[in-house]
Amino acid sequence: MVQDYPQFTMELAVRHGETGTDGRAKLSAVADWFQEAAALNAADLGFGDELVFSRGLTWILTRLVFSVASLPALGQT
């Protein structure tokens, strides 16, 4: 059974420290954005850091696989 979860979106712009010498976002920056989105989404769903940490728990992202057709450039959203 597939559950229908609410869609989570966040908009950001590529910052200087997130780009490589080609002016495009580094893959490490993209992975960081996914982790940030996951944390914010968890909070929106009611099990964010405050609740999890208060119970002496944490969540860990152990694997992330993604495919990128084109990396965004500096300042792009």
Image (spheres, rainbow, N blue to C red):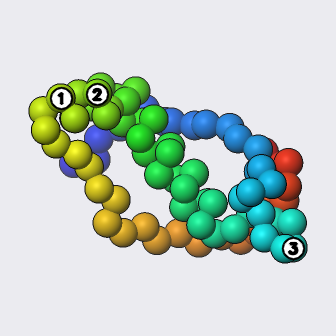
Marks 2 and 3, how far apart in space? 38 Å
Within 10 Å of the Cα at label 3, are there few (<14), some (14-19), or many (20+) other Cα atoms?
few
User: Between disc 1 and disc 3, whose residue precedes?
Assistant: 3
User: Residue 44 at what x, y percent from top left?
Assistant: 40, 27
Q: Name the residue located 63 percent from the left edge and 69 percent from the top edge.
A: 27
Which residue type does callout 1 highlight?
Answer: Ser
Q: Name the residue located 46 percent from the left edge and 71 percent from the top edge.
A: 65
- 44 vs 21, nearest the viewer: 21
Marks 2 and 1, how far apart in space? 6 Å
What residue is pinned by disc 3? 22
What residue is pinned by disc 1? 54
The image quarter containing residue 25 is bottom right
- 53 vs 5, nearest the viewer: 53
Q: Is residue 19 above or below residue 52?
A: below
What residue is pinned by disc 2? 50
Which residue type does callout 3 highlight?
Answer: Asp
SS type, badge 2: helix
User: Residue 34 at what x, y percent from top left?
Assistant: 52, 53
User: Between disc 2 and disc 3, whose residue precedes?
Assistant: 3
User: Residue 35 at what x, y percent from top left?
Assistant: 47, 51
Marks 1 and 3, how far apart in space? 43 Å
Q: Find out whether the residues at labels 1 and 3 contact each other: C-beta distance under 8 Å.
A: no
- Left or right: 41 as drawn, with respect to 67: left
The image quarter containing residue 5 is top left
SS type, badge 3: loop
Q: Is residue 51 above or below residue 10?
A: above
